[in-house]
């Protein structure tokens, strides 16, 4: 019975992650509609993105350590309703102030659910954490593919607004809750010396976690900026809403497929992540010279394929290197991602307001290069990865 309930956890985590991607991808396309409804500029659009990601820098750090102590499934059962409530509050918002409050609450539920489910998968399948993280994260990408296309179709009917995405994400979590109730997940080997480490010790001795912290901040900054501003690039500079939706969906679809493929490939995590930063750095430089719509669409699809496995590989390296404190480690990495996702989109929005989105995106070449140099150092501290 216990083995079967362990198996229940995989589809529960996959469904949970699917609707996180669904909300994220839908918000990316809905952002422009929200800006129009509340009369917001590019800088304020970047701030709205930052609001959700600022929640990521607080909640996981508070609850990651608690999850290691009390059990990760219990934390998920508490924060799934938080995500549900945040989505409903966001959908019902009638002003930008209420929208900000709702999206912040959604971000809290989002961040804890993603963080704790990832560490729980690592605990449940030690030695195979990269496979399961890539597989489950591919459902995130699939959700992010479906929602922009669905929202674009629903908006075209004139019967729905951007709010429908948040209602559907909330409904998905309501349906998944019973499955999470009957599932079980494994526990980490708490005999590890890593369990005795404080947060500061884990970050500094050896500095592997600090390196992964910086790398995931760079990655999420890239992913968030592309996902939230790709649609704006097509709409504002080419007046093409259809290709904008295809660009966001193509980015996530390519990411989904690459994560699924790398779940089965036996390649070291540090090597995959190394090239996952190096190739996008070159692509972002190329973006400066792409002025036509179809090449731009192809660009975003290739970018998604290159970036796809980076997030699961970084998280897998962290949780497997510190098995006794995987919840704390994944929460620290989530904070790193939250910082990258909160700061860089605002900066890109501000630059784009003055110089245009092509120049704004070029900043990501330097971010990607930074991630490249960080991942080059991981082999020294984690040679098996």
Image (tube, rainbow, N blue to C red):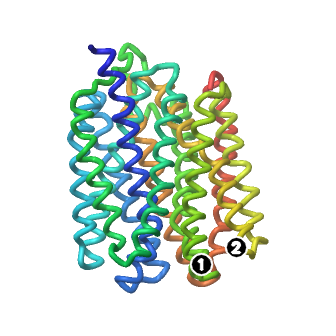
Please indicate whether residue 64 sits to the left or right of residue 332 in the image: left
Q: CA distance from mark 2 to mark 1?
A: 9 Å
Residue 269's place in the image compared with 236, above or below, is above
Whether pointer 2 and pointer 1 mark residues with C-beta atoms closer than 8 Å, the reply is yes
Q: Pinpoint residue 178: horizontal percent, then vertical percent.
A: 21, 36
At a point 27% along the width and 66% down the height, the residue shown is: 90
Please indicate whether residue 227 sits to the left or right of residue 111 in the image: right
**Could you tell which of marks 2 and 1 lies nearer the N-terminus?**
1
Indicate the quadrant containing the C terminus: top left, top right, bottom left or bottom right. Answer: top right
At a point 57% along the width and 51% down the height, the residue shown is: 253
Residue 357's place in the image compared with 226, above or below, is below
As helix, strand or loop, the secondary structure at mark 2 comes to helix
Residue 205's place in the image compared with 82, above or below, is above
Residue underneath mark 2: 293
Res 351 visible? no
Tell me which corner region of the image, top left, top right, bottom left or bottom right, holds residue 298: bottom right
Residue underneath mark 1: 240
């Amino acid at each position: 019975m216990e083995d079967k309930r362990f198996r229940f956890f995989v589809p529960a985590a996959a469904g949970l992650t699917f609707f996180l991607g669904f909300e994220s991808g839908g918000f990316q396309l809905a952002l422009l509609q929200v800006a129009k409804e509340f009369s917001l500029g590019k800088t304020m659009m970047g701030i709205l993105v930052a609001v959700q990601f600022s929640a990521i820098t607080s909640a996981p750090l508070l609850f990651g350590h608690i999850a290691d102590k009390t059990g990760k499934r219990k934390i998920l059962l508490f924060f799934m309703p938080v995500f549900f409530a945040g989505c409903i509050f966001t959908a019902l918002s009638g002003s930008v102030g209420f929208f900000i409050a709702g999206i912040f609450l959604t971000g809290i539920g989002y961040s804890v659910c993603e963080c704790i489910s990832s560490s729980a998968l690592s605990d449940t399948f030690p030695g195979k954490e990269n496979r399961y993280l890539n597989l489950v994260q591919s459902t995130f990408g699939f959700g992010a593919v479906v929602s922009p296309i669905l929202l674009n179709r629903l908006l075209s009917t004139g019967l729905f607004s951007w709010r429908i995405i948040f209602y559907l994400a909330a409904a998905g979590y309501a349906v998944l809750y019973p499955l999470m109730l009957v599932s079980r997940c494994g526990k980490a080997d708490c005999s590890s010396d890593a369990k005795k480490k404080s947060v500061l010790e884990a970050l500094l001795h050896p500095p592997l976690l600090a390196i992964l912290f910086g790398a995931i901040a760079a990655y999420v900054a890239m992913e968030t900026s592309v996902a939230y501003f790709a649609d704006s690039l097509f709409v504002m500079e080419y007046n093409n809403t259809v290709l904008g939706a295809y660009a966001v969906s193509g980015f996530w679809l390519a990411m989904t497929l690459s994560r699924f493929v790398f779940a089965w490939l036996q390649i070291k995590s540090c090597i995959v992540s190394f090239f996952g930063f190096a190739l996008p750095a070159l692509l972002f430089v190329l973006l400066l010279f792409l002025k036509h719509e179809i090449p731009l669409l192809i660009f975003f699809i290739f970018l998604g394929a290159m970036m796809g496995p980076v997030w699961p590989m970084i998280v897998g390296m962290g949780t497997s290197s510190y098995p006794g404190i995987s919840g704390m480690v994944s929460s620290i990495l989530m904070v790193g991602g939250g910082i990258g996702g909160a700061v860089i989109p605002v900066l890109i929005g501000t630059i784009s307001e003055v110089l245009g989105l092509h120049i704004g995106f070029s900043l990501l070449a330097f971010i990607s290069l930074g991630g490249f140099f960080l991942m080059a150092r991981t082999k020294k501290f984690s040679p098996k990865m």
